[in-house]
Image (spheres, helix red, strand yellow):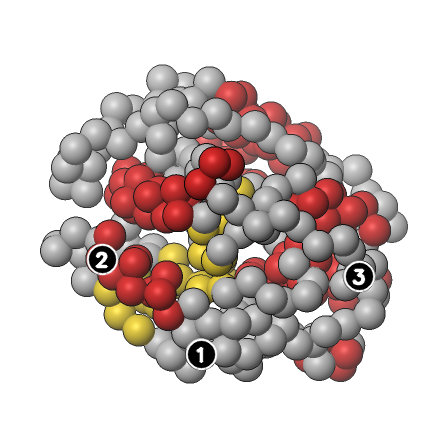
Amino acid sequence: MLDAHVDSTRTERRPWTEADGPMPALYLGHGAPPLVDDELWTSQLASWADGLPRPRSILIVSAHWESAPLTLGATADAAPLTYDFYGFPQRYYEMTYPSPGAPQIANRVRALMPDTEPVAERPEYGLDHGAFVPLMVMYPAADVPVLQISMPMQMTEEALVALGAELSPLRDEGVFILATGNLVHDLRHANLAEDPEPPEYARAFDAWVATALEHRDGAAPSPGARRRPTRSCPTRAPSTTARSSSPRAPHGAPRPASPSRASSTARSRGAASSWTDTRPDKV
């Protein structure tokens, strides 16, 4: 663990029951490890978790683990973390998150995948920072079983939506599904000034995504979505803002895999938005 703005003494949450209905699926920006020292970000995540029943297990997909086919991470208890970041102070490489493993969820993921979708295993791959950083804030006691799965980047967006639909039944079993990345992730145009204003293209893209989610554009996968596209989104992001905000797909890719987007009836809701600079020299 790591002392920061993470409160490991929070009141115990009521366990999930079937009467609660499906656990939600959440897409959030994970940022770099120093976000555990950011009071706004930690208060938002802790508040979200406090408003939910305690899940039976957590299934998480991070933008930082790209591997095809779909791959299951470590299922052992207290598996060592994957410190997939560089140039930060030593204390961030001493963080621990000894959560229980979730082999039962691994078995359920295998069972939910169609015969045409192979599932691989990497038992040595512990939670990476896209997974353990938000979990340290939301579930600081590390007492909920966690399984991380890879982001199979060979899939089209339509196939990722279909993947979310295939994983969605887990929510009815008390599994909290987390997808982490960032809608805007453009280090080429990083402004190193103190507390800079976000560039206009980033604000425009962020606003467009919020509108698209609110109106459920392209949300529901049709049968056979892995083989043929679902209906196209009626409105596409302006290409310049999209390319500038996320030059490579991975940080936004977990969003369409979120089961909440993969449902034609689920309600999308934006919980909070903020802009954070997590450069190592600001720690």
Is 228 displayed left or right of 162 in the figure? left
First-in-chain label (1 vs 2): 1
Q: Residues within 10 Å of mark 3 (few under 14, many from 20)?
A: few
Camera sees residue 84: no
Q: Residues within 10 Å of mark 2 (few under 14, many from 20)?
A: few
Looking at the rendered structure, the secondary structure element under dot 2 is helix
Is 202 displayed left or right of 246 in the figure? right
Question: Mark 1 — residue?
Answer: 76
Is 60 displayed left or right of 169 in the figure? right
Q: Quadrant of the N terminus?
A: bottom right
User: Which of 112/223 is in front?
Assistant: 112
Question: Mark 2 — residue?
Answer: 111
Looking at the rendered structure, the secondary structure element under dot 1 is loop
Question: Mark 3 — residue?
Answer: 9
First-in-chain label (2 vs 3): 3
- Vertical side of 11 occupied by 85: above or below: below
- Vertical side of 165 occupied by 192: above or below: below
Residue at image position (66%, 76%) is 96
Residue 109 drawn at (x, y percent): 30, 58
**CA distance separating discs 2 and 3:** 37 Å
All told, the count of numbered labels is 3
Q: Identify the amino acid type marked 2.
A: Ala
* Mark in front: 3 vs 1: 3
